[in-house]
Structure formats: structure tokens, C-alpha cells
């Protein structure tokens, strides 16, 4: 991510494109897609110029949802793919996604190779007669639709005759999802389905207001469910038939419950997923696997464990039998299939989810103190049961406490998941104090509240 025309200049993007193409042999095919906004056109075309200068041939997918571009890479003979969109968090910034031949976000090793080539300016330049071509395929959406429909029980969904509200957030998901609904006999109520070149990302307050408005419309129109598909079509936010917005943990719990009651399997989510998800998986004969929160790590963990379902805890859902990507379009279609088979409403299933206490605190922490905090936590709990999958998770009576460094901001997360709300607050207060003490200690031995924790 970078500021458009300040950090992401045409020159910078052309060099980045050339560096990406240099990861592959001359003549390799690379797919390129974007959103509908003008800055994305500029960035993508600059990257295409750079990739061609390094000998790559370009498959130009034009405007396309992110998961559709990933699916194209997975099912066609391409060496990699890129997708450019304006950031949903900052209207001044652009997001560039890079994928491998399987349509998965490039791993850390590939990132390092790309960075070395870019910053050393060790970029391959081919002769004029070796430059690649540009082609414009017309089958990207069709092949994606065929892939989705081949994974669904179409007749079961058609018989259910769902009525669904969908807010597209002016994204390119409106190119695809209405066609899926037509095949599935789903009556859809689309909102914000028109492309907007001047799209501006919503503030947190505006986003919450949009969800509340969608919830009101969902209940007023008598829809079985409402869905908010984010601008890039990666994340899905759900509203039940009674017009209540589901939080991410509830939505993931519903997906897990419906999927595991059909067949046992593994569900994957970040270590911060609440204790109730693990117990829900065990209740239905499945197993919960905690992974790092970083997207590529989570996706590869889902692949490694042959999971039935994975979630990033932020509205992103991955079904590895479809593709290793956060795909809101397929997730919504799969949810309709699961609901059609189950026969209950979304609100009824929501009422059956196990409940517990979940406390999440965010604490400021200078970058240079992050390592010290983690070393302090590990040392303090060396004789206790811990899990180091991501951060340090300390197991306590009835649940756990997770101390997790933020990868992008100078802060720490203290997350508590237990059965009792009072216990959750008490543990959050204690570990808040532990992290604060570790941040404040300049290399000396920090105050050790371990004895106090054991006394309690």
C-alpha cells in the first residue's frame, strides 16, 4: 500500500512490475486486474509496462473482483497475477496485491526476492523482440461462475427460494454475484451496485451506520438474510432474518457449525479466535487449528491441514476446496447452500452458538519495545502452559489470555477468552499492567507479577 502519485508513482510501479516479472522466466504469462477507479488504471498500466519490459506476456482482466482474479490464476496457465485497487482504509492510497500461480498471496520468501531485485535495481530488461504481448480474455467471470456452481448443491438452493439483501459497496462484486443468484433462483435486493470512480472509503462510524441501515432494510423487506460485500469482494458481513448484525465471531461460528454438522473436519482461524469456536468444533467432532493472523500464513495453514473452512476473524472466509483466497462471493453462496440443507433460519442457528466472555484491549507500544515485551512475557510464563502460534497465548482456568504484537502499528493486543465476564475483565486488567510494565522497563528486569497471578 502507498500514497498514489507520491509513493506509487508511474516510475515506481513500472519498476515494481519489472521486478515481479523478473521472478519468472522470459515469456511467462501474468494476469493483471484492477478496480474501477482512475488511479488504479494508472498504477496497473504502469506495472504492465514494467512487466512487458522484463519479457512477460500480460493477460489483461480489466476490472475484476479480487477473488475472481485469483481464481483465474489458479485455473489458467499463468505464472502469477496482480490486482490493483484503491485502499478501503485511506482514499489517498492504493493497494497492490501479488499472487502466485495458484492464486495465493505470495509468501515471505518470494516477497524478499522481489524486494532484493527492486531495491538493488537488478531488473531484467529484454530485447525489443522479446517483449511480451497483451491479451484480453472474455471468459474470466464465466470460468469463475462454472467453478462456483460446480461446488454447490444447486437444486437444493433453488428449492429454498431465498430472498437476500446485498450491499455491494460500489465494488465489482456486482459484476458477478447477481449472475450467481440468477442460477440459484435467489431473489436479491441489491444496494450500492453502481460503480463509482470517485469512491471514498468509509470511516468506521460510516461503516457501522451502513450496516445498521442494511439491517433495517433486511428486516423490513422480510429477507432471510442480509450481506455486506466489501469493496474488493473479499470480506462478508452478515445480517440475520431479524435484522441483527452478526459480529465476526458469530458469523464464523455459524459457518463452522453448519459445515461441521455435515461432515467432520478442521477449521482454521487466528489464535485470537474465541474459545467458543474451539469448543464448537469439538462438539461437532471437528478440530480447531490456530494460525498466525497474517493472511498468507492463514491461507497456507488451511491448505496444509486440509481444512473445511478458515477465517481471518475480520470477515474473510476461505474454503480450500474452492480456492485458497478470501472470497465473499463464494462464502455467501456456500452459506445459502448450508442454510438450505439445515432448514433453520440464521437467527435460530445464532441462538444456539455457545457463549462466553471476550475482552480485547489495545495498548500503545514503541516499535523498539515490542521485542522486549515478548521476551518478558515468554520468560514470565516459562513454567506455564502456553501456545506460541502467534504471540503468546497463556492458558488459564476456563480459557486463555493472548498477548499479541501488532504487525503494522506500534501497539500490542491483549485478548482474553473465558467463560465468565468478570474473570475476563480481571485478566485483561492484569495483563494490561504486565505489558505496560514491560514497555516501561529499559532493558532492566521488569516487575514480575507472576506470583500475584498465581495467588489469584
Image (cartoon, rainbow, N blue to C red):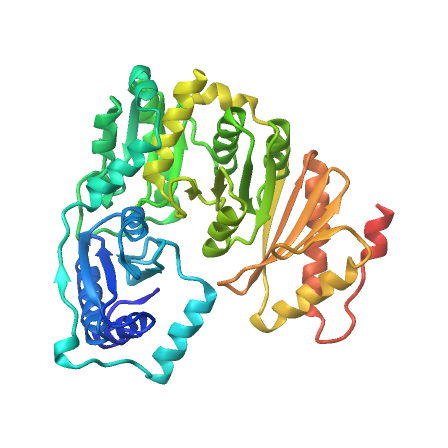
Q: What number of labels is visible?
A: 0
| Quarter of the view holding residue 344 | top left
Q: Is residue 282 visible?
A: yes
Where residue 163 appears, as percent x and y from the top left, is 29, 21
Measured along the vertical axis of the image, is residue 394 above or below residue 286?
below
Of the pair 395 and 337, the residue shown nearer to us: 337
Depicted 341 relative to depicted 432: above or below: above
Residue 233 place in picture, x, y as percent:
31, 44
- Quick check: 318 left or right of 184? right
Q: Residue at x 77, y 50 (%)?
A: 385
Q: Look at the picture and state if 128 lies above or below 290.
A: below
Residue 74 point in image, percent of width and height? 32, 51
The reply to whether residue 36 is in sight is no
In screen coordinates, is 85 left or right of 370? left
- The residue nearer to you, when weighing 312 against 77, is 77
> Horizontally, is 254 left or right of 243 in the view?
right
- Which picture quadrant has residue 43? bottom left
Residue located 16% across and 74% down the image: 131
Out of 443 and 339, give the one closest to the viewer: 339
Q: Residue at x 59, y 65 (%)?
A: 365
* On-image quarter of the N terminus: bottom left
User: 41 or 80: which is nearer to us?
Assistant: 80
Q: Quadrant of residue 273?
A: top right
Q: x and y percent of residue 336 in the render? A: 37, 26
Residue drawn at (16%, 76%), measured in percent from left and top? Answer: 130
Q: Left or right: 166 with respect to 268? A: left
Screen quadrant of the C terminus = top right
Amino acid at each position: 500500500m502507498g500514497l498514489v502519485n507520491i509513493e506509487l508513482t508511474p516510475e515506481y510501479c513500472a519498476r515494481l512490475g519489472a521486478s515481479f516479472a523478473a521472478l519468472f522466466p522470459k515469456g511467462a504469462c501474468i494476469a493483471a486486474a484492477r478496480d474501477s477507479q482512475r488511479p488504479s488504471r494508472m498504477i496497473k498500466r504502469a506495472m504492465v509496462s514494467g512487466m512487458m519490459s522484463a519479457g512477460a506476456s500480460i493477460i489483461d482482466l480489466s476490472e475484476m473482483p479480487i477473488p475472481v482474479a485469483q481464481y483465474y490464476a489458479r485455473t489458467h496457465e499463468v505464472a502469477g497475477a496482480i490486482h490493483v485497487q484503491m485502499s478501503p482504509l485511506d482514499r489517498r492510497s492504493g493497494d497492490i496485491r501479488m499472487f502466485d500461480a495458484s492464486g495465493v498471496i505470495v509468501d515471505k520468501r518470494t516477497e524478499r526476492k522481489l524486494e532484493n531485485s527492486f531495491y538493488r535495481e537488478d531488473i531484467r530488461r529484454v530485447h525489443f523482440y522479446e517483449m511480451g504481448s497483451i491479451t484480453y480474455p472474455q471468459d474470466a467471470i464465466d470460468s469463475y461462475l462454472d467453478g462456483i456452481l460446480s461446488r454447490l448443491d444447486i437444486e437444493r438452493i433453488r428449492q429454498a427460494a431465498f430472498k437476500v439483501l446485498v450491499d455491494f459497496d460500489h465494488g465489482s462484486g456486482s459484476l458477478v454475484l447477481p449472475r450467481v443468484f440468477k442460477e440459484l433462483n435467489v431473489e436479491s435486493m441489491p444496494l450500492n451496485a453502481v460503480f463509482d470512480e470517485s469512491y471514498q472509503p468509509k470511516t468506521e462510524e460510516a461503516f457501522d451506520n451502513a450496516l445498521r441501515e442494511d439491517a433495517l432494510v433486511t428486516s423490513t423487506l422480510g429477507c432471510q438474510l442480509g450481506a455486506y460485500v466489501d469493496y474488493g469482494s473479499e470480506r462478508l458481513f452478515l445480517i440475520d432474518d431479524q435484522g441483527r448484525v452478526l459480529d465476526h465471531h458469530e458469523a464464523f461460528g455459524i459457518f463452522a457449525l453448519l459445515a461441521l454438522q455435515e461432515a467432520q473436519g478442521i477449521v482454521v482461524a487466528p489464535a485470537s479466535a474465541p474459545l467458543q469456536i474451539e469448543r464448537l468444533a469439538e462438539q461437532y467432532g471437528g478440530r480447531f487449528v490456530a494460525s498466525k493472523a497474517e493472511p498468507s500464513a492463514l491461507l497456507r495453514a488451511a491448505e496444509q491441514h486440509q481444512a473445511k473452512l478458515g477465517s481471518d476473524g475480520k470477515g474473510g472466509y476461505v474454503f480450500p476446496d474452492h480456492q485458497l483466497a478470501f472470497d465473499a462471493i463464494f462464502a455467501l453462496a456456500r452459506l445459502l447452500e448450508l442454510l438450505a440443507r439445515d432448514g433453520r433460519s440464521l437467527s435460530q442457528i445464532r441462538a444456539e452458538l455457545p457463549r462466553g466472555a471476550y475482552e480485547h484491549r489495545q495498548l500503545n507500544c514503541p516499535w523498539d519495545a515490542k521485542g522486549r515485551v515478548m521476551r518478558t512475557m515468554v520468560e514470565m510464563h516459562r513454567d506455564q502452559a502456553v501456545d506460541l502460534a502467534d504471540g503468546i497465548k497463556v492458558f488459564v482456568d476456563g480459557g486463555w489470555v493472548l498477548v499479541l504484537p501488532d504487525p503494522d502499528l506500534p501497539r500490542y493486543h491483549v485478548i482474553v477468552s473465558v467463560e465468565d465476564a468478570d474473570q475476563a475483565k480481571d485478566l485483561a486488567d492484569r495483563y494490561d499492567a504486565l505489558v505496560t510494565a514491560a514497555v516501561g522497563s529499559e532493558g532492566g528486569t521488569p516487575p514480575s507479577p507472576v506470583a500475584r497471578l498465581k495467588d489469584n
